[in-house]
Image (tube, rainbow, N blue to C red):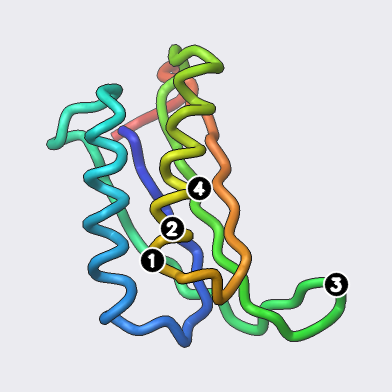
Amino acid sequence: MPTLLFHHPRELGDDTLAPLMDALHHCALDSGLFEARAIKVATLPLFHTRQAGEAKPFAMLQVRLFAGRTQEQRQALSTALLATINEHLGGHMSAIVEIVETDRATFSR
């Protein structure tokens, strides 16, 4: 943990996604909250996106991590990750970051 799941329009190509995934990994590592070997990053393409009833692309990063970080740590991580996404997407679409805490007692691997 953490697992960063980047939901994106299917039209985004590897030339955008590969460097973004590297940047998100480094951003999470630079937060000081995780060891490099624990960070997992993946992409999930979205089909037929809509915003306000219009066909419009957007991106979302869901960050799943074990409970125990402070609100300030989670907020700083969220802000840094969103800035990283916006740098790579160049303002071509809206993006959001959601931090989701996972209960260790119910997590299996």
Residue corresponding to mark 3: 52
Amino acid beneath label 2: Ile
Q: Is residue 28 above or below residue 72?
A: below
Q: Nearer the viewer, mark 2 or mark 3?
A: 2
According to the picture, the residue beneath numbered tag 2 turns out to be 85
Q: Residue 39: which quarter of the image?
A: top left
Task: Residue type at mark 4: give it.
Answer: Gln
Question: Whole-percent x and y of residue 82?
Answer: 49, 49
Quick check: marks 2 and 1 in contact, CB under 8 Å?
yes
* Residue drawn at (35%, 84%) of the image: 13
Numbered circles on residues, count: 4
Vertical comparison of 10 with 97: above or below: below
Q: Would you call the spot at circle 3 few (<14 residues within 10 Å), some (14-19), or many (20 or more)?
A: few
Q: Nearer the viewer, residue 29 or 68?
A: 29
Q: Amino acid at mark 1?
A: His
Relative horizontal placement of residue 52, taking residue 83 as reference (left or right) = right
Residue identified by numbered label 1 = 88
Disc 1 versus disc 4: nearer the observer: 1
Residue of label 4: 62
